[in-house]
Image (cartoon, rainbow, N blue to C red):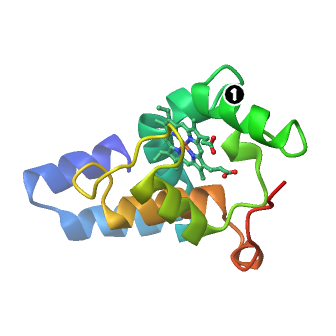
Amino acid sequence: MSRRTKHCLGAGVCLLAAGGWALAQGATPPSPPPADMQAAAGGKIFGKWCGDCHSTPGGSGSQALQRKYRGDIPDILEQRTDLNPDYVRHVVRHGVSFMPSFRKTEISDADLSLVATYLAPSPGRADRVTKRP
Ligand code: HEC
C-alpha cells in the first residue's frame, strides 16, 4: 500500500478517491497468492519455535536427526521432502525423544497447520510417510 493510500485510509476519508486514483494509475498491487502467504507465515512460526534446533546443522534437532538417519536424508527439516503434515503435527504435540512437545497455548492448531504445510508443502507429499531407517 502506498503512503498516499495509507494516509487516506488513516484519515477515514477519500476511500473512493484513493480507489479511483489506484485504478487510474493501474497501481492496485496484486495480492500475493495465498499459498505464498501461508508458506511465509509457516516459515515465521517455524523460525520462532523450531529454528534454534532445526534450521542449522549445529542445532540439537539437526544433530539428533543426523545420528538417526546417518545422512540418508537431510538433517535440516526445511530440506526434507518426506515429511507428512500429520506426522509433523503429532511430533509437535507429543514431542519425540528429547524434543519437547508444544501446547496449543504456545502454537495454536492454526499455526501448527501452517508449520506442517511449510515443512510438507505439496499435496502430493501428504500421503507419504516419513521414511524409517
Ligand atoms: C529443543 C530443541 C527442539 C525444538 C525447539 C524443536 N525440535 Fe523437533 N526435534 C528435536 C530433536 C532432538 C528431534 C529428534 C528426536 C529423535 O531423536 O527422534 C526432533 C525431531 C523432530 C521431528 C521428527 C523428524 C523425524 O524424521 O522423525 C519433527 C517433524 C520435528 N522435530 C519438528 C519440529 C517442529 C515443527 C518444531 C517447532 C514447532 C520443533 N521440531 C522444535 C529437537 C527440537
Using a 10 Å C-alpha cutoff, classify the residue at mark 1 as few (fewer than 14 neighbours), some (14 to 19) or many (20 or more).
some
Residue 56 point in image, percent of width and height:
66, 26
Q: Nearer the viewer, residue 84 or 132?
A: 132
The answer to whether residue 32 is above or below residue 10 is: below
Residue 28: in sight, yes or no? no
Residue 101 point in image, percent of width and height:
39, 48
- Report the amino acid beneath label 1: Gln
Residue 117: in sight, yes or no? yes
Residue 45 point in image, percent of width and height:
43, 46
Tag 1 residue:
63
Say whether mark 1 is within 8 Å of ligand 1: yes
- Residue under the image location 47 percent in, 43 percent down: 44
Q: How many marks?
A: 1
Judge from the rendering whether residue 4 lies leftward or rightward of residue 12; answer left or right: right
SS of the residue under disc 1: helix
- Residue under the image location 52 percent in, 48 percent down: 96
- Residue under the image location 53 percent in, 33 percent down: 51
Judge from the rendering whether residue 64 lies leftward or rightward of residue 81; answer left or right: left
Q: Nearer the viewer, residue 12 or 45?
A: 45
Q: Quadrant of ligand 1?
A: top right
Judge from the rendering whether residue 72 lies leftward or rightward of residue 44; answer left or right: right
- Residue under the image location 46 percent in, 50 percent down: 95
Q: Residue furthest top?
A: 58
